[in-house]
Every structure is written in structure tokens, then in C-alpha cells.
């Protein structure tokens, strides 16, 4: 925290700021950041298309931080286990084994797919959900989005004002592997804050007051840099 604020003080003291302030108020910022489309491979082949799309699980079921705190958060593996303690593989394989077992007049065997085995391993459990010697460890998810430390972004202020996840993250419910949809440049933030002024029908409220119709969301440097 202190490293962060001293960094910010240096940042705001820099001569750059005055010049940039002039530019920022006079022209539209052009997007500069370049990570659009970044979609790193993940340690478990978790699919948003399947879970948030086909199965229609609510974003906030897993990213429950988004409404009340700065970070949306990645769910702990225990959230996956709410379903995967029983769903040990894809439905197709589970049903095929059940049919085969019926044909062969025996009890169905427990089928655990390679991907779900990784989920169990992260819980420190084997295929039969018995504790292993290696114990639990978090799944090492690879971070997709990453704003620089000198920018303050807070999910709750946006999500609690009714902005949909998709307005910034795109159609995540159709992504097999999640990618970065928006460029996260300063221009992207500021242009949206400005656009909110363009439409006089938009009325927004905030904790310390109410934005009037036509008044735009703040573009003060210190709102995002402090
Ligand atoms: C069943 C749990 C679950 C649900 C439901 C879910 N997510 Fe996720 N989400 C995850 C996990 C696990 C990751 C980390 C792995 C990955 O990136 O795919 C993640 C990653 C993300 C990321 C990238 C985070 C980063 O590293 O920058 C975004 C953005 C995201 N989710 C948005 C959404 C949105 C929007 C929805 C609803 C449409 C949603 N998620 C529904 C579990 C979930
Ligand atoms: C106004 C734009 C905006 C909206 C709306 C938004 N996000 Fe984000 N999200 C971002 C930005 C910007 C980042 C990168 C933050 C950083 O790197 O500090 C991010 C990062 C994330 C991350 C990874 C880092 C973290 O915060 O834990 C997840 C997961 C995520 N968003 C999910 C969601 C979900 C789910 C919703 C809807 C409930 C949502 N976001 C709504 C802009 C947005
Ligand atoms: C609300 C229930 C639910 C939650 C929570 C959930 N899943 Fe799933 N998941 C399912 C179902 C159901 C399937 C199988 C769907 C099918 O085959 O059509 C599945 C399938 C999968 C698969 C593919 C399995 C295979 O062998 O092909 C993976 C991998 C997976 N989930 C990972 C996760 C992870 C990681 C989490 C936690 C971040 C998670 N799931 C949370 C219900 C859930
Ligand atoms: C899609 C539109 C959109 C995008 C993109 C967006 N914002 Fe916002 N932002 C809003 C809205 C709407 C509010 C709520 C204003 C209110 O009600 O006070 C807001 C509020 C804020 C606030 C609080 C302002 C206050 O007056 O308290 C901060 C700080 C902020 N945003 C930072 C960012 C940053 C940093 C980014 C880029 C990483 C960003 N925003 C991207 C729409 C957006
Ligand atoms: C709504 C949020 C928001 C506001 C308001 C804002 N910025 Fe930024 N600023 C950002 C984001 C996000 C980045 C990081 C962009 C990136 O990584 O490319 C950034 C980056 C910067 C940088 C670094 C550029 C670089 O090349 O790394 C400077 C300098 C800067 N802002 C100055 C300002 C000044 C001066 C103001 C006031 C006129 C201001 N910002 C207002 C969000 C904002």
C-alpha cells in the first residue's frame, strides 16, 4: 500500500501531468494499450461458454466480489466442488458408463475425467474424494486482465450502478477460454465516462451525490490516479 502511494505521488508530481491534463480535456484519448484478445492457456480447461452460457450459472455465483468490492475475484476451488463432488466428468461419459453398466448388469463405475481430476487434486483429494498426501493447493489460474498499479479500478462502483459485465468484458458466456475484450487504456475508461454525458436521459447516482441528467461521470485525474 505504501509502495503504491509513494509511486503515485511521484507519478502526480511528474511534469508530464500538466501537459497530459491539457490534452486529456481537449481531445479524445486514443486507445494505446495492446492486450486486447489476450487469452492465456489455463491450468484446467474451465469453459465460461459451458458454465455461464449453456448451464446459465450467474457470473456473481463465482465472482461474488464484483458487487461489493474493488476486485471481482477468482472463486476458490471449493465453489467448483459444490457441483463437481458429484459431476466427476462430462455428462456424455457419465451417461455412457451408466448405459454400459446396465447392459453388463453391474453397478456403474465412478468415472473421473482428466480435467476434473485436477480439480480434486487441488482440493487434496483423490478420485474417490479421499485425502491425499500432497494436500490442498490453489489452482494456479493465469491472470488475464492487469491494469498498472497506478490506476485505481473498483468493480463495486461500476457493477452496483447497473453496468453489465459484458459492457467491459464482452460476451464471456460464449467464450470457451476467456479473452481480454477491452484494451483497458485510459482512453477506454475516459471515453465511457464522457459518453455518459452525451445522453441526457442517463441519470446516475453515486455515494456522495447524484449526477444530474447530462452531467458526465468524473474525468478528474485523481479519481483514477491517487
Ligand atoms: C462456475 C464459476 C464461474 C462462473 C459462473 C463465471 N466465471 Fe468467470 N472465471 C471463473 C474462473 C475459475 C476464472 C479463472 C480461469 C479463467 O480465466 O478462465 C474466471 C475468469 C474470468 C475472467 C478473467 C479474469 C482475469 O484473470 O482477468 C473474467 C473477465 C470473467 N471470469 C468474467 C465472468 C463473467 C462476465 C461471467 C458471467 C457471464 C463469469 N465470469 C462467470 C469462474 C467463473
Ligand atoms: C466498467 C468496466 C467493468 C465492468 C462493468 C466489469 N469489469 Fe471486471 N474488470 C474490469 C477491469 C478494468 C479489470 C482489470 C482490473 C485490474 O487489473 O486491476 C477487470 C478485472 C476482472 C476480473 C479479474 C480481476 C479481479 O477483479 O478479480 C474478473 C474476474 C472480472 N473483472 C469479472 C467481472 C464480472 C463478473 C463483472 C460483472 C459482475 C465485471 N467484471 C464487470 C472492468 C470491468
Ligand atoms: C453449478 C454447478 C457447477 C459449478 C459450480 C462448476 N461446474 Fe464445472 N461443470 C458442471 C457440469 C454440469 C458439467 C458437465 C456438463 C456437460 O458435460 O454437459 C461441468 C463440466 C466441467 C468441466 C469439463 C469436464 C470434462 O471432463 O469434460 C470442467 C473442466 C469443469 N466443469 C471445471 C469446473 C471448475 C474449475 C469449476 C470451478 C471454478 C466448475 N467447473 C464449477 C457444473 C458446474
Ligand atoms: C462502460 C462504461 C465505463 C467504463 C469503460 C469505465 N467506467 Fe468508470 N464509471 C462508469 C460509471 C457509469 C460510473 C458511475 C458514476 C457514478 O454513479 O458516480 C463510473 C465510476 C467510476 C469511478 C468513481 C467515480 C466517482 O465519482 O466516485 C472511478 C474511480 C472509475 N469509474 C474508474 C474507472 C477506470 C479506472 C476505468 C478503466 C479502467 C473505468 N472507470 C471504466 C462507467 C465506466
Ligand atoms: C477514468 C479513469 C482515468 C482518468 C479520469 C484519468 N486516467 Fe490516466 N490512466 C488511466 C488508465 C486506465 C491508464 C493506464 C493505461 C494503460 O495502461 O495503457 C492511465 C494512464 C495514465 C498515464 C500513463 C501513460 C502511459 O503511457 O503509461 C498518465 C501519465 C496519465 N494516465 C495521466 C492522467 C491525467 C493527467 C489525467 C487527468 C487529466 C488522467 N490520467 C485521468 C485511467 C484514467
Image (tube, rainbow, N blue to C red):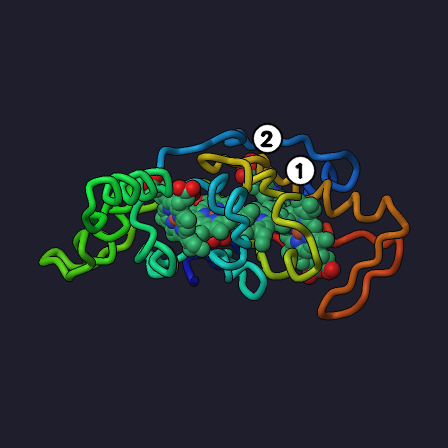
Residue 164 at what x, y percent from top left? Answer: 66, 50
Q: Residues within 10 Å of mark 2 (few under 14, many from 20)?
A: few
Q: Is residue 220 visible?
A: no
Does 208 sit above or below residue 178? below
Q: Which residue is found at the position 54% from the left and 58% from the top?
A: 60
137 to the left or right of 204: left
Q: Nearer the viewer, residue 133 or 3?
A: 133
Does 15 sit above or below residue 124? above
Q: Residues within 10 Å of mark 1 (few under 14, many from 20)?
A: some
Q: Kindly check if marks 1 and 2 are in contact, taking CB atoms under 8 A apart as contact.
A: yes
Q: CA distance from mark 1 to mark 2?
A: 8 Å
As drawn, the label of residue 32 is: 2
Q: Which residue is found at the position 57% from the left and 66% from the top?
A: 68
Which corner quadrant of the image does residue 204 belong to?
A: bottom right
Does the residue tagged 1 have its C-beta within 8 Å of any atom of ligand 5? no
Q: Which residue is found at the position 18% from the left and 56% from the top?
A: 128
Residue 144 at what x, y percent from top left? Answer: 44, 40
Q: Which residue is found at the position 60% from the left and 38% from the top?
A: 170
Q: Quadrant of the N terminus?
A: bottom left
Q: Quadrant of the C terminus?
A: bottom right
Does the residue tagged 2 have its C-beta within 8 Å of any atom of ligand 5? yes
* Residue at the spot of label 1: 187
| Helix, strand or loop at mark 1 | helix
As drawn, the label of residue 57 is: none
Mark nearer the N terminus (1 vs 2): 2
Residue 72 at what x, y percent from top left? Answer: 51, 56
Amino acid at each position: 500500500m505504501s509502495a503504491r502511494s509513494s509511486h503515485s505521488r511521484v507519478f502526480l508530481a511528474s511534469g508530464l501531468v500538466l501537459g497530459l491534463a491539457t490534452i486529456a480535456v481537449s481531445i479524445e484519448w486514443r486507445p494505446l494499450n495492446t492486450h486486447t484478445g489476450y487469452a492465456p492457456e489455463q491450468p484446467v480447461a474451465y469453459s465460461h461458454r459451458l458454465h455461464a452460457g449453456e448451464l446459465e450459472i450467474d457470473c456473481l455465483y463465482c465472482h461474488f466480489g464484483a458487487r461489493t468490492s474493488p476486485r471481482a475475484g477468482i472463486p476458490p476451488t471449493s465453489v467448483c466442488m459444490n457441483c463437481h463432488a458429484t459431476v466427476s466428468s462430462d455428462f456424455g461419459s457419465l451417461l455412457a458408463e451408466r448405459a454400459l453398466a446396465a447392459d453388463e448388469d453391474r453397478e456403474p463405475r465412478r468415472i473421473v475425467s482428466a480435467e476434473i481430476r485436477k480439480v480434486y487434486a487441488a482440493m487434496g483429494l483423490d478420485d474417490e474424494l479421499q485425502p491425499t498426501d500432497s494436500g490442498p493447493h490453489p489452482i494456479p489460474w493465469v491472470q488475464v486482465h492487469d491494469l498498472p498499479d497506478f490506476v485505481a479500478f473498483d468493480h463495486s462502483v461500476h457493477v452496483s450502478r447497473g453496468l453489465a459485465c459484458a459492457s467491459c468484458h464482452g460476451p464471456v458466456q460464449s467464450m470457451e477460454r476467456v479473452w481480454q475484450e477491452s484494451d483497458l487504456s485510459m482512453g477506454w475508461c475516459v471515453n465511457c465516462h464522457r459518453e455518459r454525458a452525451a445522453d441526457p436521459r442517463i441519470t446516475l447516482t453515486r455515494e456522495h451525490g447524484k449526477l444530474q441528467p447530462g452531467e458526465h461521470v468524473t474525468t478528474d485525474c485523481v479519481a483514477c490516479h491517487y
